[in-house]
Image (cartoon, rainbow, N blue to C red):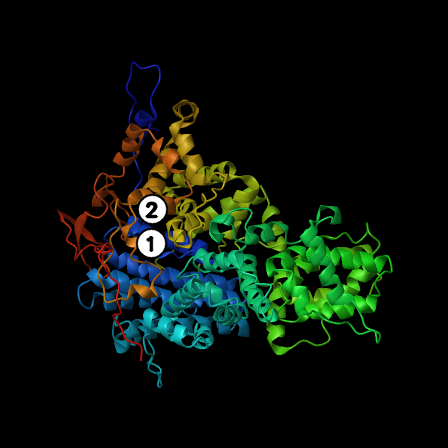
Amino acid sequence: MLAKTPPLGKPDFSTAEIASAVDDLPITNSRVGLYAYLNAALGARPLTDDMSLFNYLHAKYQNDTQSLVSDLIISSFDVLANALQQSQSQNHILCYRSFIANKLPLLITTLSGSFAPMTSQVYIQMALRRVDVHPFPPLSSEGDTAKNEVLKKSRQDFVQACVMFQLGDGQAFHSVMGEPPAQVTPRVTRYNRQSLTQQCIANIHRVEELARELEGMNGNAGAISGALVDTIQHLYTAKETMSLRTVCNALSRQMPLMDVIFQYAQPADVLSPLCSLLNEWTHDEDQSEFQPPYEEFASILLLVLAINHRYQLTEAEFGTFLPDTFIMRFLSSMSSSIPTGALDDDQSKQLTKWVQGLYATDEQGETNGISDETMSHCPPQSFYLLVPTLFEQSVQACKLMALDINTLKGGLEFLLEPFLLPSLIGGLSWATKHSWEDHGDSEILLQMLRKLVQPDSISGDAKAMHQTILAMVARSLATSLQELQRRQPKRKDVFPLIEILQSHQDSQRSGKGSAVELAEWCATPEGGLRATVRSIVRGLVRWSGQGSINTMAYNYKHQTITVALDMLGADEVLAVILNELIAQTRAGSGSAALEVATAIICAPSPLSAALSQANALMQFDQATPLPISPRRTMRQVLRARLEDNKELLRMETERVEALVRLGRRVEAQLAIPAQLTMPMTNLDLGDMNITSADMQITGADMHMTGDTTTESATAAVDPDFAAAMDQSLQMDATNISDPNAMSLDMSNDLFNTQDMNFDLTGASQQHGNGQMSNEDDIFAGLEMDLGGDDFDFS
C-alpha cells in the first residue's frame, strides 16, 4: 500500500504527488551490487573508465570508505572466481587477473589520498581476511585445484603491487593471509608513463618489450598502457608510419593484451589516430618504392580491424568519422563486391592491373608478381575496397575456364605476403557470404580456401598476421563451411578446414553470448529468456543474503542481460525485473532486490563509455556528431513509466511502489555532481585513464557517462516529481538494516556530506552531522593539477 494518502478533492494526481506517497525501503549496500557492476565492466570489452567508476563508487558508498575498499577488493576476486567456475579461456582470465594485480591497487592508491596514515593497510587487511582463495573443492579434480591456485597467485600479485604502491607492509598483509611471504620476491620498479613514452619515441623497439611486459602482474600495466597509447598518438601526429608499423605489429600479434590496455584507455584513444592516418594516407605515384608504404598501411589496418572484430565496436566507440571516409566505407562494404558495370574508370584500370599482377604468366608459366607499377596507380585504400570484387572476378574467371585453377592458387600466394595479407579479411568475408549452391563454383572456392586458410608455406612475420586474420574470419567462415558439409555430407575435404578454423574461434570479447549459450538461455523452463533474467535477479538476491559467508560467487554472466535487451527490448526486461522485485519484497527481501535491480540497470555499457569520451576525440579534428543508439535503455523506460501519472494511477499499488523505489535508487546511483573531485595522492595520473582535461568536465558534459539518456530527456523531467523522488531517500542510520549500509541525502551536495568515523574493527560506520573536510572526502581534489612526473623510471 502507498505509505501516504494522496490529497483529496482532486480529480487527478501529479507524478510528484504519487511519488511522495511512497516510502522507501532500508538501503542495503552489499558486495553483490559491485559484483554485478564489475561483471559488466570486465565480462567483455573492459568498461573500467576511471571517472565513471569513481562516480559509481561515490554514489554507492558516499563516505563509507571502509566498505568501499573492502567490497571493491572482495568483489574483484569474486568476479575472477566466477570466470574460473565458468571455465573461461586463459586469454579471458588474463583480463580479470590484470585488473586485480594492476588496476585495483591504482584505484585504492587514488582513493587513499584522504585516508589517515595506515588506513589503507588496515582496509586491505580486513578485505584479505574475507577473500576466499579455495572456493573450489580441492579434491574434486585437478582443474579445480588449478583454479584455486590462480586465485591464490592473484592474491599474491595483488599484495605485491600494493606494497609497490606503498599501500602497506608486505609482512602485515601476509600475516592475515595465513601464509609466509614468498621467499624470493624480485624487486619491481614502479614505472612512470611519461618516462616510458619518451623511451618508446627514442627507441621504437622498446614498444615490443613493453608489450610483452603487459602480461605481467606487478602493478605496472597502467603506466605501460598509457605509454603505448601516448606513443601511438605521438607517431600519428608526427606521421611516422614506419614506427607505427612496429607498434601495430606488436599489438596485433597478441590481441588479448588489448583487454589490459583498454582497462586504462578507450578504444577511440587508439583507433581515432590510426583511422585518421588511414583516411589521410598520402599515395605519391612518383616515389621510388611502393611495397614499404603498402606494408605500413597493412599493419595499421590490421590492428584497427582486429580491435573492431574482438569487441564488435559501434560507430560511437570507434570514433567520429564521416561516412565517406575510407575506414567507414571499408567497414560497411568489407565483404561486398562491386558490379563491374558500377566501377568507375580508375577502379576498372586498377582492377585490371591487379588481375594482371596476380595471374599474368610468362612463357614458362610463371607469374610476374606484383610490380611497383601495379601499386603506383592504386593507393592502398583503393586496393582494399576492390578486394571482394577481385575475389569474385577471379572465381568467375576460373568457372568460365578463362583462368586455370593452379594459376589462381599461384596468384593467391602473393596475398600471403605481409604487405597484402590483410586483404584476406575482405576476400574471405566475401567467400563466407557467397552461396555454396547458387553459383556452381564450390570446388573452386574450396581450393581457394585451402590455399589461404592452410598455406603450404608462409614467412615468420606473415604467420603472426595470418593467425590474427584467421581469428577474425574463423567463426563466420566455419559456420558457412558447416552448412556446406550439411548439404554435402559425403565430402571429406571440408571438415579439415572447419577444424583449423575452430581453433581460432575464441577471439572475441563483445558482450554477445555464443549460439550455444543463447540456445540454453532461451530454453530455460517457464519462460525462456525471461525466466533466465528472473533467475539471475533471484540468484543474486539469494547470494546477497549469504554475503557474510565465504561462499562461491553466484554464477553470473552480464551477457545474458545484454542479449535479453537485444532480443526482448528494455520494456520487457524491466517488466521481468519489476515482477521479481515485487515478489522479493513480499518475501521480505525487498532491500536486497532493490540493490540487485539497481546494479543491473546501472551496469556500464559500451555506448555510455563511448559517449564519455566524445570530447577527447576532438583532438583528432573529426567534428561530426556522435551517433546515438536508437534503442531505449532500461533507465529511459523506467523514467518514462514514472512520468506517466495516468498509467501510474491505473497500476496496482505494489507495482507503483516498486517503480518509484527503483526509480529513486537508479537516479541516485547515476547522479553526477556538478564537479567531480578526487583525492590528492602521490599517484602519477599518467597511470590512470584520467587527464587534466577530464578533470574539468562539467556536470552537463559528464551526464552522459551514467547512461545513454539524452540531455533533452533529462531536461524533460518534472522538477516537482524529481523532488518527490528524492525526498524519501533522505534516510538516517535508523533506517538501515545492513551493517554495511549507507545513508543517502540527495538534497545535499554529493561532496559536502556528513563526517564519518573510521571503524577499523569492522563495526558499522557512525555518521555525524558536521561538515566534511577535504581530508575526509575520499574524492576531494580531482580538479587540482595532479600531472607531472612524480616518479622516475630507473
Q: Measured from the top left, where is residue 350 in percent x and y?
A: 69, 58
On the image, the x and y values in percent for residue 96 come to 44, 64
The numbered disc on residue 702 is 2
Q: Residue at x 31, y 27 (%)?
A: 16
Is residue 98 among the parts visible in the rendering? yes
Residue carrying label 1: 51
- Quarter of the rendering occupied by the N terminus: top left
Extreme-right residue of the structure: 401
| Residue at (36% x, 30% y) in the render | 716
765 is higher (above) or lower (below) than 628: below
Q: Is residue 635 left or right of residue 743?
A: right
Which label sits on residue 286? none
How far apart are the two marked residues, 1 and 2, measured between alpha carbons?
9 Å
In this orientation, which residue lies closer to the viewer: 354 or 532? 354
- Identify residue type, mark 2: Met
Secondary element under disc 2, as helix, strand or loop, is helix
Look at label 1 and name its amino acid.
Met
Q: Residue furthest bottom?
A: 184
How busy is the neighbourhood of tag 1: few (under 14 within 10 Å), some, or many (20 plus)? many
Q: Are marks 1 and 2 in contact (CB under 8 Å)?
A: yes
The reply, left or right, for residue 397 in relation to residue 256 is right
Classify residue 380 by image quadrant. bottom right
Residue 322 point in image, percent of width and height:
51, 47
